[in-house]
Image (cartoon, grey):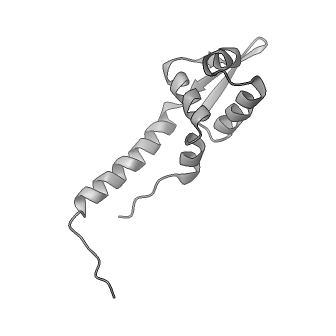
Amino acid sequence: MLMSVDTDLLRILADPLRMRIVTLLARETLCTTHLVAETGARQTNLSNHLKVLREAGVVDTEPCGRFTYYRLRPEVVETLAGQFAGLAAEARATGGTKRACP
């Protein structure tokens, strides 16, 4: 069985600032103001990255007055981790297989 990894999601998470945001949100639900303080990113830059994460389904939002809180959706990260685990299992299972050159 050929395993694959969600390359779109991988590309989204490969950005260092987005990965920092995901790491912070793994620990607690934070608003934009907290994320600006924690990352040192400018508000507009951070908002653009949060939009990408939200559209990809990586984070959920929760309005709270004039603030928006962001929460990591752990099942998205688990799915990606499972895809990598599947690749590793496939490599273990077929480790001795070598295709002959034509």
In front of the other: 73 or 44? 44
Query: Quadrant of the image for the C terminus?
Result: bottom left
The residue depicted at 44 percent of the width and 38 percent of the height is 78
Measured as percent of width and height from the top left, residue 42 is found at 74, 24
Residue furthest front as drawn: 40
Residue furthest top as drawn: 65
Query: Quadrant of the image for the N terminus?
Result: bottom left
Residue furthest left as drawn: 96
Q: Taking 101 as reference, is 83 left or right?
A: right
Q: In this view, does 97 lie above or below 37?
A: below
Measured as percent of width and height from the top left, residue 14 is found at 55, 42
Residue furthest bottom as drawn: 102
Measured as percent of width and height from the top left, residue 84 is found at 39, 48
Q: Taking 11 as reference, is 79 left or right?
A: left
In front of the other: 23 or 79? 23
Q: Taking 72 as reference, is 40 left or right?
A: right
Measured as percent of width and height from the top left, residue 49 is found at 68, 34
Residue 44 image-quadrant placement: top right
Counting the numbered discs, the total is 0
The residue depicted at 24 percent of the width and 70 percent of the height is 97
Q: Taking 4 as reference, is 61 left or right?
A: right
The residue depicted at 75 percent of the width and 23 percent of the height is 43
Q: Is residue 20 above or below residue 1?
A: above
The residue depicted at 30 percent of the width and 58 percent of the height is 90
Q: In this view, does 23 lie above or below 95?
A: above
